[in-house]
Image (cartoon, rainbow, N blue to C red):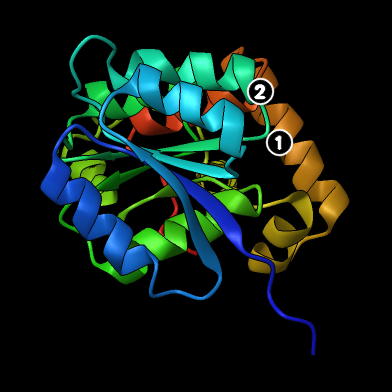
Amino acid sequence: MSERPKIRVLLIDNHPLVLDGLKAVLETFDHIEVAGTAGLAQTGLDIARQVQPQVVLMDINMPKLSGIDAIELFRNDLPQARVVMLSMHDSREYISSSVMHGAAGYVLKDVSTDEIVSAIDTVAAGGTYFSSGVFDALMGERAEEGSDPLTPRERDILGLIVAGRSNREIAEALGITAATAETHRKNLKKKLGIATTAGLIRYALDHGIISKVR
């Protein structure tokens, strides 16, 4: 059996204790390589250009350049790198802003190590990841009943899109064909007047629609 390829991860946080602790824990996983660490977003970007990480775990509140503002810089300079925000903030404003700037995930700092690793694995594979605490926060701030024009099935489809599922995976989860899943995806965009998947995710976050299925 071939060895599982390592996922190269860059950690960015201006709190040394958090940075050192996270690095020490992640290095206990054989399939994860901590390729570098930084205390500032700009420093992290400079390091990323050298080490070419697959996943960037980054705090939001940092001096000089915030994590949210840095997302677009990473996307422009290293489009292959997937950025996951690691934050203590569970407000919809922070979450939605992160997604609209291009983050592939949002994880709260109080989650277990296993959940952080799940986030790394998921986004490295091309998916999106929102931790359980983010789900709870969004559901606690749901929009008023009647403001959402989607049917229950459309909400299910959108929730799975937010979870990073492909049309084939959506089809398997809901017992439909991949072609039907693709049709639902297109109809959602048309119905909501949204052109991109990022826009669909923003809508889902604003309306408390997010799938807990991993």
Asked whether residue 209 appears in the rendered view, the answer is no
Q: Is residue 82 above or below residue 9?
A: above
Classify 10 Å Cα crowding around label 1: few (below 14), some (14-19), many (20 and above).
some
Who is closer to the viewer here, 120 or 195? 120
Q: Give the residue type at disc 2.
A: Lys
Label 2 sits on residue? 189
**Which of the 4 image quadrants contains residue 207?**
top left
Classify residue 75 as left or right of residue 203. right
| Front one among 207 and 89 | 89
Q: Categorize mark 2 by other alpha carbons within 10 Å: few (<14), some (14-19), many (20+).
A: some
Which residue is at a point 69% across and 18% down the rendered structure image? Answer: 190
Location of residue 100 in the rendering, given as x and y in whole percent from the top left corner: 46, 19
Q: Secondary structure at mark 1?
A: helix
Identify which residue, 39 or 90, lies in the foreground: 39
Residue at the spot 54% in from the left edge and 60% down from the top edge: 121
Q: Quadrant of the N terminus?
A: bottom right
Return the x and y of residue 185 as percentages of the image width and height. 71, 36
Q: Compared to 64, does 140 lie above or below?
A: below
- The answer to whether 141 is drawn above or below residue 126 in the figure is above
Q: Is residue 191 left or right of residue 208?
A: right
Whole-angstrom CA distance, mark 1 to mark 2, is 7 Å
Query: Pointer 1: what residue?
Result: 185
Q: x%, y% of residue 79?
A: 66, 26
Q: Is there CB contact under 8 Å for labels 1 and 2?
A: yes
- Residue type, label 1: Arg
Residue at image position (72%, 29%) is 187
Task: Spot the residue most to the right.
Answer: 179
In this view, 186 is above or below 162: above
Could you tell me how many numbered marks the image carries? 2
Percent x, y of residue 130: 38, 48
Closer-to-camera residue (109/43): 43
